[in-house]
Amino acid sequence: MSGRRPMPDVYREDELDRLIRWALYSLVINARPSPAAWHNVRRQLPLSSPGAAIREKRDPSGWQRSARGVWSWTASALTYVFDQEWDERFTKQRNARRWRDYLALAMLSSITMMAMC
Amino acid sequence: MIARTRQGDYAAFEALYNKYKGQVYRTALAIVRDQGAAEDILQDCFIKVYTHIDRIDSSLPLIPWLYRVTVNLSYNWVTRRKRWLTPLENVIDRLTTAPRTSPEQAVEEDELQRAVQEAIYSLNFEQRVVLILFYLSNFSIREIAYILDVPEGTVKSRLHYGRANLRQKLLGDRRLSIGVAYEWS
């Protein structure tokens, strides 16, 4: 059923309500997303399951693990060199230990940063 | 459907999308008044559903969560939008509006619809969203408060001032003071 009415009286609460509802419905009536929207969503989803997708974010990937392994080994080797060689060479020097501490700290920082990647 | 989606069932996720896409899209469209943006918001919303599916409590209804995400994404879009584009888009919109078959009545309806829609759109974001959730999505005050994560009193206040501002804008609109009529259907 349809019929023409005069301009609604917006001072009346019910008329204002109807006017707002009518304007909003007319704005979205027959509005539908295009089929391409779903394809875009589908295309952007990770290939693995949602749980796995979240776990992927938490767990390091293969290359991250490899990088950490290499850095860990390098750090161990360098620490050994410092302990064995540099200590012997600079035992008599006053600043030897301080230098070693600085270098060890720098290495630890690097390793931590790599681990955070 | 949520449980099956968690297990990687794309068909379940597609069913979830098909079930709620209309509501999400229409709500976003009402807020941003831009079909392309509404579609982007719809896509982003469901990508969030998928990537956050482990955090969604399947014992609770999904709808409020979806609306919350939709409103937040719409807010991001509105705030990101360059202000100078708005008047230009309005002009383009007017120029490209398809002609209607019943000229006189269509013009009157269009004028009134446009006037009310523009008045709604000119409200601030918070008031506009409350009006849309209340009048278009038919949510209660309590539900809107839950979706927006604000106290019920805030929702009531936004609704009250939104309506009051809208009334003032409509009363001050010349298009509505020349006796246009609208049709109920």
Image (cartoon, rainbow, N blue to C red):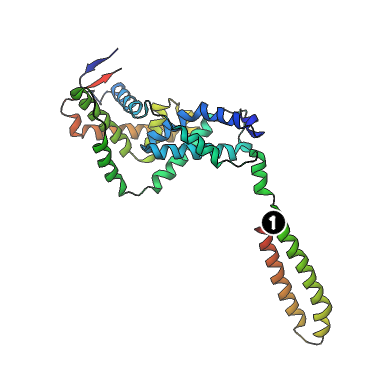
Q: Give the chain letter at badge 1.
A: A
Residue B170 pos. (x, y %):
24, 32
Q: Quadrant of residue A73?
A: bottom right
Give SS at disc 1: helix
Tell me which residue sits at (35%, 40%) in the image.
Answer: B124
The vertical placement of B23 against A117, above or below, is above
Residue B25 pos. (x, y %):
44, 32
Residue B50 pos. (x, y %):
58, 37
Tell me which residue sits at (50%, 40%) in the image.
Answer: B44
Position of the C terminus of chain B, as image quadrant, is top left
The residue that mark 1 highlights is A63
Badge 1, how many Cα within 10 Å: few under 14, some, many 20+?
few
The vertical placement of B121 against A80, above or below, is above
Q: Would residue A66 appear left or right of B176 to someone viewing this image?
A: right
Tell me which residue sits at (18%, 24%) in the image.
Answer: B104
Q: Residue furthest bottom?
A: A92
Tell me which residue sits at (81%, 85%) in the image.
Answer: A89
Residue B176 pos. (x, y %):
20, 29
Q: Would residue B39 appear left or right of B115 to someone viewing this image?
A: right
Question: Which three-letter amino acid code belongs to the residue tagged 1?
Answer: Trp
The vertical placement of A91 against B24, above or below, is below
Position of the N terminus of chain B, as image quadrant, is top right
Q: What is the number of callouts on the image?
A: 1
Q: Quadrant of residue B10?
A: top right
Q: Would residue A101 appear left or right of B96 to someone viewing this image?
A: right
